[in-house]
Image (cartoon, helix red, strand yellow):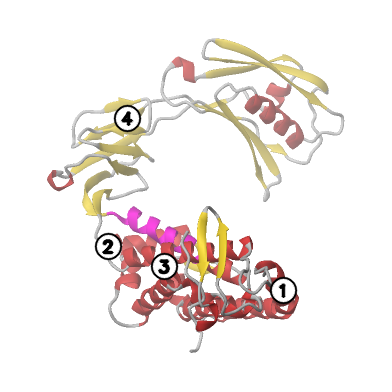
Amino acid sequence: MRVSNSLFNNSISNFYSNLYQSKISMHASKLSQDFFPVNNSKSQGTFGTDALQYINDIKSASTSLSGALKELSGPAFSQRNMVSSNSDILTVNYTGNKLNSMGDTTVRVDQTAAGQLNEGSRLNSAARYEGDRGINRFTIETGGKTTQLSVNVAAGDSNRDVQQKMATAINNAGLGLRATVETDSKTNTSILKIESSNTGSDEKNSFKISDTTGNAIARTGANDVSRENRDAVYSVNGGPAQTSKSNTVNLGNGLNVTLKEASAEEVTISRGKDTDYAKNVVRDMVQSFNSLFSAAAQNMGDPKAQGLASRIVNISSAYSNSLSSIGIGFDNSGKMTIDTNRLNQAAESGRLEQFFTENTGRNYGFTNQLGRLADNVANNTSNFVSSALFGNALGENFSYSGFGNLVQFNNVGSGNIFDYSF
């Protein structure tokens, strides 16, 4: 089968080449001795805990992968919920139990709730700090309490060094304030920002900062208030303006919204496809895929593990271009990655559903092929472990008591390698 994505194919080819050349010869003998340690007595053998872990890993991952793919073949896209017409302005969390009777609700966000924000002066990051040296003390008044903090300014400190020392002192004080130093690499400047973690117009959510010894506050401009603490302002169904100390608002009947951004646009909340549910199932699928692939790839000394990894790669590489269009890519090790923005776009446009649920064509093939492989591994796990690695007592009865469960090995040489439970 011709692989359309050359970059993906090259990375996978290099991955397997490196594994085959550097790991196979090194691990083949080790696996037979350590991965599957054997007791050479005629009637009894032992099965290593590493081997049991490998079997448990591929069974667990393949079971999860199979379940996620079954969901993505249809059920994941039939879920309904209360959804926002513009999730950049507000998002919805419906916790009620009367979805079918819920009507549309419109919300306009005039202002989001916020805490006080002080933005200091923009200084040359690497330039030598020109303020007072030695111990600089300053106070922060918030919530009716005054706290004194200090920083030690060394002779060679840059502007950014002092800003970072101040940010660290503020964050460590546990005052409900978050201090950060933002650097602009294009202009080689940095700025100290201090923001209240609490939102709302209450006086307790404001703060005042000032120098007591030295001039660190004045020099960095950390006392400049760029945004007062404030309430959220919104209206529902064209009604009067309402306020909230928080951006999380309960509109009643189990309808909870999070206000994200002010806008003149009225956002409609209505019953619709629950794309968040589908995206979460995609994330589960990716996680399970990576777990199954990693377990097989880490045990390439076992020919059947090598074969499993190869089959996983063959399926995924055949659909790499189509997967990329819905936000699923691959790193250099062959593991799946997610481009969140592209995944969101694919979910909103319907491409995500189309990829996983089409009944004909290549896209359906991915879900079908990978699902069949996952089912096979989950239901016939013994077929993906090489019997030759069990040692030289094939044909005998084996028993191993591990992980709190009894694992029985009967007629090992007959093609039915073992029966087990986890």
Q: Label 2 neighbourhood size at 10 Å, few (<14), some (14-19), many (20+)?
A: few
The residue pinned by badge 2 equals 75
Label 3 neighbour load within 10 Å: few <14, some 14-19, many 20+? many
Q: Is residue 416 above or below residue 404?
A: below
Dot placed on the residue nearer the N-terminal end, 3 or 2: 2
Viewer-side residue, 396 vs 284: 396
Q: Amino acid at mark 2?
A: Pro
Q: Mark 4–mark 2 contact, CB under 8 Å?
A: no
Looking at the rendered image, the disc whose residue lies closer to the viewer, 1 or 4, is 1
The local secondary structure at tag 2 comes to helix
Compared with 212, 296 (above or below) is below
Q: CA distance from mark 1 to mark 3?
A: 38 Å
Q: Earlier in the sequence, mark 1 or mark 4?
A: 1
Q: Quadrant of residue 353?
A: bottom left
**Which of label 2 and label 1 is nearer to you?**
1
Three-letter amino acid code at the position of disc 1: His
Magenta region: 274-290
Direction left: furthest residue: 101
Residue 168's mark? none
Q: Nearer the viewer, mark 4 or mark 3?
A: 3
Q: Is residue 337 among the parts visible in the rendering?
A: no
Instruction: Residue 233: give its label.
Output: 4
* Left or right, residue 403 beside residue 170: left
Report x, y in % for residue 346.
37, 64
The residue indicated by pointer 3 is: 326
Q: Looking at the rendered structure, which numbered label has been put on residue 27? A: 1
Location of residue 242 in the rendering, given as x and y in whole percent from the top left corner: 27, 27
Please name the residue shown 33% across and 67% down the image.
Answer: 70
The first of marks 4 and 3 along the sequence is 4
